[in-house]
Amino acid sequence: MAGFKNSQGFIFRQIDSLNFMTLIQLLLILLVVLFIKRLFSKFRTHELSSGEFVAWLILWLAVGVAAGLPDTTSYLAIWLGVGRGSDLAVYVAVVVLFYLAFRLFVRLEKLEHSLTELVRHLSLQQAAVRDNKTINNQAVAEQQNSSANQQIN
């Protein structure tokens, strides 16, 4: 298989039409197609906003291109000043994972705050209902006492 060196000395294989995909490339592309299909179904059912849909679509298309044409990551890595395409993929994956962890943390904090507010509201409602029952029970008891006293007299 023919290859060439770039200015930094990295050897790349040429992409030719007779180059067959490896099994891992086929599996990754199949997974990307399945993820994109699921992405469209989630978007149609309004489980994803337009912005989320576009961000995820770009991510999965990039993964598909990287899986189908692995040399593209090397070209992009050199353009960005990173040593190898696999290094670039790891850096991007780490950044994406940290971003997703941050979003999950923010969402969790928001859910905890909402849950606290809901529990506080329900507790106050239940306390008010209990107070009303106590007042009503006292009123009923007073009425029974006064009617019993009237019958005795």
Image: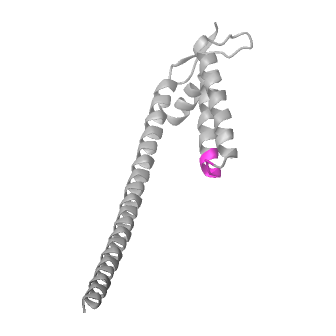
Q: Residue furthest right?
A: 17
Quadrant in the picture for residue 125: bottom left
Quadrant in the picture for residue 67: top right
Q: Nearer the viewer, residue 46 or 28?
A: 46
Quadrant in the picture for residue 128: bottom left
Q: Residue furthest bottom?
A: 153
Residue 15 location (% of width, % of height): 68, 17
Residue drawn at x 64%, y 38% is: 39
Placement of 115 over or under 8, stated as above or below: below
**Can residue 69 be seen?**
no
Residue 153 location (% of width, % of height): 25, 93
Placement of 129 over or under 24, stated as above or below: below
28 with respect to 16 (left or right):
left
151 within the magenta span: no
Region in magenta: 47-54
Placement of 41 over or under 24, stated as above or below: below
